[in-house]
């Protein structure tokens, strides 16, 4: 992606945003369907840190199980119980509210006050582990998230469901950001656009003054929504073009499981070794998280890849100009991910099983209505909802 836009390029027109339902699919939109999150325990997430706390230090690490609460809700509760300012409370990633999740938090607290945190316990909040560590837990510190998801009352044949799952294993999943990034009815996007318009056009500032967020956390969330939306649009375009998992001239590549990127120097040819690594998921094509491009950045797309990225981002001139105006640095994100250790089994629906919960191996689905239980892990930053989107249409239980 080329750094060829400026604040003066921003359009005064309101840019229309597309819902996540309009994004392209890797294997075509499915007609299979199922019910998701009928119970909180139907969507379980277990965050894996990937390192052990040191056992000493001024920060207390807490592994907390929460039900029907957001990560921010728990951080607020920790602050209330301890009297510690929110800035001294850390977590690695945001987890679903309508779910049963286990994740790590850190709080800067003297050892003599550890016992005070017993007040945190409730029916929906439990401390599972606690360890001391030298440093605060920062965003993105975890390695993976493990998921156990129950899809109830699956509508479609077991062969169709299992073929979609095998396709997911073979081709991977488009690495879309989930809808929770954008707020209800895309409210985060409309707010960030109004805010950026006010910043870029002083004559509009009075009209849009209510859209200007005061809190740093809120600003960060809106920046994230803007970048995530632009990335999703670019990935959808690459899917439509049929090259989301195929190298085109100028692509920036990512080493699997890392944040490291590399690019072929202009003039060098894509070769068989690189193609094999791409097919084996050792490397991935990336897309932009737009912002300012540093003149020293070695990993900037060019050629056909840059043409595609520029054409998509040009449609959202206000967001692009605003991100650069506020000095956000451009970054890259893989266009795909593959679930780790994906497995599944069938269970007769409770509505037909008189309260029993027998499970069956794949290909031995019981007669009548059935539930599908999925078990897998994802690297940080990947969304389980993006995987489910490729499998079936999910209807969340009210």
Image (cartoon, helix red, strand yellow):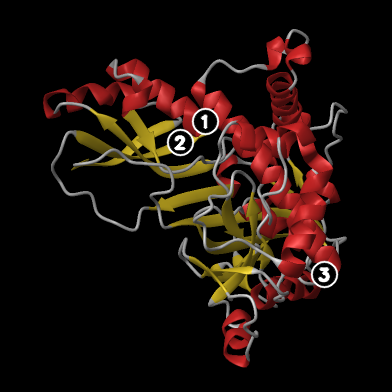
Image-quadrant location for residue 353 = bottom right
Measuring from the top left, give residue 259's x and y in whole percent. 47, 60
| Residue linked to disc 3 | 157
Circle number at residue 69:
1
| Lower sequence index among marks 1 and 3 | 1
Is 176 left, or right, of 99 in this rendering?
A: right
Is 90 left, or right, of 378 in this rendering?
A: left
Label 2, secondary structure: give it.
Answer: strand
| Residue linked to disc 2 | 66
| Lower sequence index among marks 3 and 2 | 2
Measuring from the top left, give residue 230's x and y in whole percent. 72, 46
Residue at 71% x, 33% y is: 7
Q: CA distance from mark 1 to mark 3?
A: 35 Å
Query: As displayed, is residue 218 above or below residue 63?
Result: above
Measuring from the top left, give residue 188's x and y in whole percent. 69, 29
Q: Nearer the viewer, residue 61 or 345?
A: 61
Image-quadrant location for residue 192 = top right
Label 3, secondary structure: give it.
Answer: loop
């Amino acid at each position: 992606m080329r750094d060829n836009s400026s604040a003066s390029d921003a359009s005064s027109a309101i840019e229309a945003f597309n819902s996540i339902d309009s994004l392209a699919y890797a294997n075509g939109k499915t007609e299979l369907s199922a019910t998701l999150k009928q119970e909180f325990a139907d969507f379980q997430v277990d965050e894996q840190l990937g390192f052990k706390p040191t056992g000493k230090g001024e920060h207390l690490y807490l592994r907390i199980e929460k039900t029907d609460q957001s990560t921010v809700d728990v951080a607020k509760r920790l602050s209330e119980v301890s009297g510690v300012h929110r800035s001294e409370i850390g977590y690695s990633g945001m987890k679903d509210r309508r779910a049963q999740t286990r994740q790590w938090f850190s709080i800067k607290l003297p050892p003599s006050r550890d016992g005070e945190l017993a007040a945190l316990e409730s029916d929906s909040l439990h401390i599972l582990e606690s360890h001391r560590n030298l440093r605060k837990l920062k965003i993105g510190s975890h390695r993976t998230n493990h998921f156990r998801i129950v899809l109830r009352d699956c509508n479609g044949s077991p062969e169709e469901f299992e073929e979609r799952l095998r396709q997911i294993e073979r081709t991977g999943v488009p690495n879309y950001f989930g809808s929770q990034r954008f707020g209800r009815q895309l409210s985060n996007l409309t707010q960030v656009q109004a805010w950026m318009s006010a910043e870029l056009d002083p004559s509009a500032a009075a009209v849009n003054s209510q859209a200007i967020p005061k809190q740093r956390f809120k600003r960060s969330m809106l920046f994230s929504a803007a970048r995530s939306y632009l990335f999703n649009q670019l990935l959808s375009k690459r899917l439509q073009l049929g090259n989301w998992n195929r190298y085109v001239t100028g692509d920036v590549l990512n080493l699997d499981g890392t944040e490291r990127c590399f690019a072929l120097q202009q003039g060098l040819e894509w070769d068989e070794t690189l193609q094999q690594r791409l097919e084996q998921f050792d490397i991935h094509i990336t897309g932009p998280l737009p912002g300012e491009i540093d003149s020293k950045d070695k990993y900037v797309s060019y050629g056909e890849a840059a043409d595609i990225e520029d054409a998509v981002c040009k449609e959202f001139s206000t967001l692009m100009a605003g991100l650069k105006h506020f000095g956000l640095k451009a970054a890259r994100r893989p266009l795909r991910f593959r679930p780790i250790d994906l497995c599944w089994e069938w269970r007769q629906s409770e509505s037909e099983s008189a309260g029993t919960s027998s499970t069956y191996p794949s290909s031995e689905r019981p007669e009548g209505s059935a539930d599908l239980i999925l078990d897998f892990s994802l690297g940080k930053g990947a969304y389980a909802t993006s995987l489910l989107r490729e499998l079936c249409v999910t209807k969340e239980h009210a």
